[in-house]
């Protein structure tokens, strides 16, 4: 009796193992068949959110990873590879079974151009961006008079220049609170006395901001600009704001 019971148990185990083996074999053959039919072969990645770089630039980054199927497309690796590019602030990568890859890009937006030998750009977080082949497409302020040592401006990282970081803060505040002035700035320079000076684009009006209380001075300048009525800031050759809670404006002669 015990022998028959033991035989039944062994038979059940054998059947279970056999069915499991058949299932695994069918699964393996199905995957092989799917790959053979190119069901899992990645389609052209769907890339969105880019403006500075183009789709070809991003596709070349992805192609270097040499992924052929969605099973091998490791999301983290693709995201990290994309975010190594200085222009990429963030990348969101998602895969949709069986063969779609969606990529959303958030690019860094240039705020100013650093006027050094190898012309570079910089964003609102003071991250240094490549300027060559790109800066000509942007009508943004030029930062001049700053330390030009190359080691202060590693691409893809924040600048090590304290003064340039301060200049970025000035431009960032202008771009959000005084946009029409920001859009009319040709140059933000640091003079020999370490004072910040804005040079306008329409006419080379010089606005001497000085060294400190910059935000307060913007409020004064904005009030002055509003009080001009039909006239404009460019009707003056110099606007000196180094004085306490006031400015001195000198017209063109």
Image (cartoon, rainbow, N blue to C red):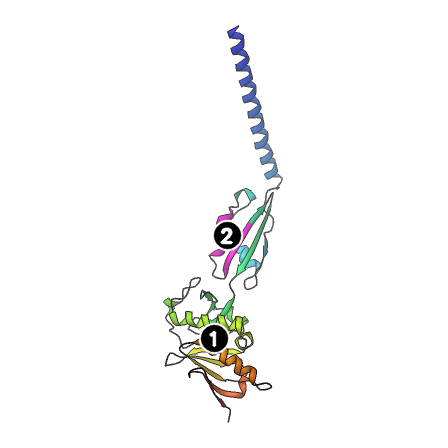
- The percent coordinates of residue 32 (x first, y second) are 58, 35
Q: Which of the marked residues, 2 or 1, is nearer the chain's N terminus?
A: 2
Whether residue 227 is visible here, answered yes or no, is yes
- The percent coordinates of residue 135 (x first, y second) are 51, 70
Q: Which mark is residue 30?
A: none
* Label 2 with label 1: CB-CB less than 8 Å: no
SS under mark 1: strand
Whether residue 119 is visible here, answered yes or no, is no
Identity of the residue furthest to the top in this view: 1
SS under mark 2: helix
Give the camera-side residue of 112 and 57.
112
Q: Quadrant of residue 144?
A: bottom left
Identity of the residue furthest to the front in this view: 245
Q: CA separation, marks 2 and 1?
A: 32 Å
Which residue is found at the position 44% from the left and 73% from the top?
Answer: 167
Does residue 238 lie above or below 95 as drawn? Answer: below
- Residue tagged by mark 2? 79
- The percent coordinates of residue 84 (x first, y second) are 46, 57
- Residue tagged by mark 1? 142
Segment colored magenta:
74-93
Residue 158 inside the magenta-drawn segment = no
Does residue 17 lie above or below 90 as drawn? Answer: above
Residue 84 inside the magenta-drawn segment = yes
Which residue is found at the position 50% from the left and 68% from the top?
Answer: 110
């Amino acid at each position: 009796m015990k022998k028959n019971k033991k035989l039944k148990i062994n038979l059940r185990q054998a059947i279970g193992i056999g069915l499991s083996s058949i299932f695994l074999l069918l699964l393996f053959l199905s995957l092989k068949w799917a790959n053979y039919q190119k069901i899992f072969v990645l389609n052209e990645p769907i890339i969105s959110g880019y403006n500075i770089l183009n789709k070809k630039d991003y596709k070349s980054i992805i192609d270097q990873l040499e992924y052929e199927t969605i099973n091998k497309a490791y999301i983290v690796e693709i995201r990290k590879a994309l975010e190594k590019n200085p222009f990429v602030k963030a990348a969101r990568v998602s895969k949709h079974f069986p063969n779609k890859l969606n990529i959303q890009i958030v690019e860094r937006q240039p705020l100013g151009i650093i006027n050094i030998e190898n012309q570079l750009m910089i964003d609102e977080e003071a991250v240094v961006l490549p300027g060559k082949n790109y800066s000509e497409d942007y009508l943004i302020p030029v930062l001049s008079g700053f330390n030009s040592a190359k080691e202060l401006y590693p691409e893809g990282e924040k600048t090590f220049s304290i003064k340039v970081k301060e200049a970025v803060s000035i431009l960032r505040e202008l771009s959000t609170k005084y946009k029409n002035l920001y859009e009319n700035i040709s140059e933000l320079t640091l003079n020999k006395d370490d004072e910040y000076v804005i040079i306008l684009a329409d006419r080379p009006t010089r606005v001497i901001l000085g060294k400190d209380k910059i935000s307060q001075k913007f409020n004064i300048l904005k009030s002055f600009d509003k009080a001009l009525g039909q006239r404009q800031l460019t009707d003056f050759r110099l606007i000196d704001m180094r004085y306490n809670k006031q400015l001195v404006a000198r017209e063109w002669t």
